[in-house]
Amino acid sequence: MQLDFLTIELLRREHPAWRLLVADNAPLIVSFLHRSFIAPNLRSLPEGELVARLEDYLFHLREERGAQAFPRSAADYLNDWAGDDKGWLRKYYPAGNDEAHFDLTPAVVRVTDWLEGLEARQFVGTESRLLSVFDLLEQLVQGTETDPEARIRDLERRRAAIDEEIERVRQGELALMDPARIRERFMQVERTARGLLGDFRQVEQNFRELDREVRERIATWEGGKAELLDEFFGERDEISDSDEGRSFRAFWDFLMSPSRQEALTEMLEHALSLEPVAELAPDPRLARIHYDWLEAGETTQRTVARLSEQLRRYLDDQAWLENRRIMDLIRESEQRALAIRDRPPRRDFMAVDEPAPRIELTMERPLYSPPRNPEIHSEAVEEAEQGDIATDALFEQTFVDRERLRGHLRRALQSRDQIALTDLLADHPLEQGLAELVAYLGLAADDEHALIDESEQGTVSWIDTQGIRRQATVPTVIFAR
């Protein structure tokens, strides 16, 4: 973006972040919103809870600065901050909830990040950022290399370096990071991880603006459905196929992998357990930052789903209007026919062979198939031999209690947000073999919160009634609250 005079003047007049910085109550607004949303990492808060929090915050400030410091009520402040002329909060009603909720706008996140950057940091790490730049440039060069020989040479060089490092480790030479490097890299990880949440808000804001434009266009649209659909899908594809949209899809696919989630959890727990990192007193919520990413990504996905829902509602309304128009034309014809019933035309003015058209398409005609003469073989029914017939197989049917399986699943989700089917079976092994495994898959198929990833598979084993170990390959199944 060019920072010329006109651009800066427009930003100063229109951008919510600039308006927040020059607002009279900027310290109150930024400190409260940071304390309520960014510090605890909350996506949204109901109106009643947020009003109560602001009342408590104003009470302490008025004790320090006097009763007239902030004369308005908490609800007035929140509604003012959510107005179109401010744009610092978004006030909305979630689906199925009659209480208003508030969420931060990306402009507030930018302001808080900028203000945090103004404070002089006690430790400024440059090595980790230099290595990050070097790694990114290396990925860029390697990812755009079209010469196969050059790629092979680079891979062989990297393999040789890895082999040398393996040999040094075998000889007992372990190159460990000193505490300064550990703290530097952890601080960069923490800043990047928290910055991703702000990026989610910006992506969601872009889709929300598209949703608002579609609603406004539908409300004033006077053309045909085809033109509106073409325009709508064109704009949606433009966002989805943009660099931002492709990056978000790649990030979401990477994060939805159960193996990646487990790897992130293990690495975060290991990093937080390091002594140099513990000296920094990091936020313990950083250990589950990837679950916060999932929640933020789901919110963005729901915003995209609302676009399709709005379009479907428009198509339903248009179909209803068209059907109503057809019925009006039919009734008008009937009324005119009744009006001339007593005085019909003196001569035939129209001849109709049938009361309704008959449509016969060429492709509806079946192909010729020669008739087949059935072959009937008659056999005499022989009388069975005398004796008792074993009926044990009729009573050896397996019944799987799905409520018992749901109980295992509920107890497992009481202490965690999600659990894989393989982990659940490790705690509660299969007792009824394949029938019980199929019942678990049926529970996952009926649960809207469960995830079935057929691109990744796992192995489940059990001991049958004859003492033989059986094994089955199933898709990855993750149950969530």
Image (cartoon, rainbow, N blue to C red):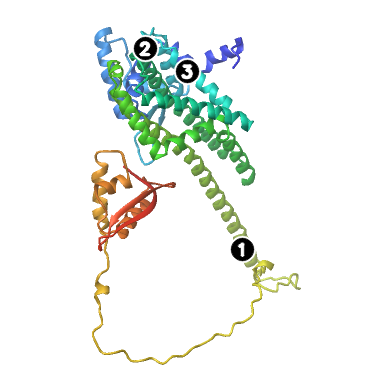
Could you tell me which quadrant the C terminus lies in? top left
Q: Residues within 10 Å of mark 3 (few under 14, many from 20)?
A: few
* Residue 181 visible, this orientation: yes
Of residues 313 and 18, the one nearer the viewer is 18
Residue type marked 2:
Pro
Q: Secondary structure at mark 2?
A: helix
Q: Earlier in the sequence, mark 1 or mark 2?
A: 2
In this picture, is 469 found above or below 246? below
Q: Secondary structure at mark 3?
A: helix
Question: Which residue is found at the position 37% from the left and 31% from the top?
Answer: 290
Q: Residues within 10 Å of mark 1 (few under 14, many from 20)?
A: few
Could you tell me which quadrant the N terminus lies in? top right
Rendered location of residue 376, percent (x, y): 51, 88
Q: Earlier in the sequence, mark 3 or mark 2?
A: 2
Q: CA distance from mark 1 to mark 2?
A: 72 Å
Q: Which residue is mark 1?
A: 335
Q: Residues within 10 Å of mark 2 (few under 14, many from 20)?
A: few
Question: Which residue is found at the position 59% from the left and 53% from the top?
Answer: 322
Rendered location of residue 137, percent (x, y): 55, 21
Residue type marked 3:
Leu
In this picture, is 381 found above or below 69? below
Outermost residue to the front: 171
Numbered label attached to residue 131 = 3
Q: Which residue is mark 2?
A: 27
Q: CA distance from mark 3 to mark 2?
A: 37 Å
In this picture, is 446 found above or below 8? below
Rendered location of residue 289, percent (x, y): 36, 28
Q: CA distance from mark 1 to mark 3?
A: 83 Å
Q: Secondary structure at mark 1?
A: helix
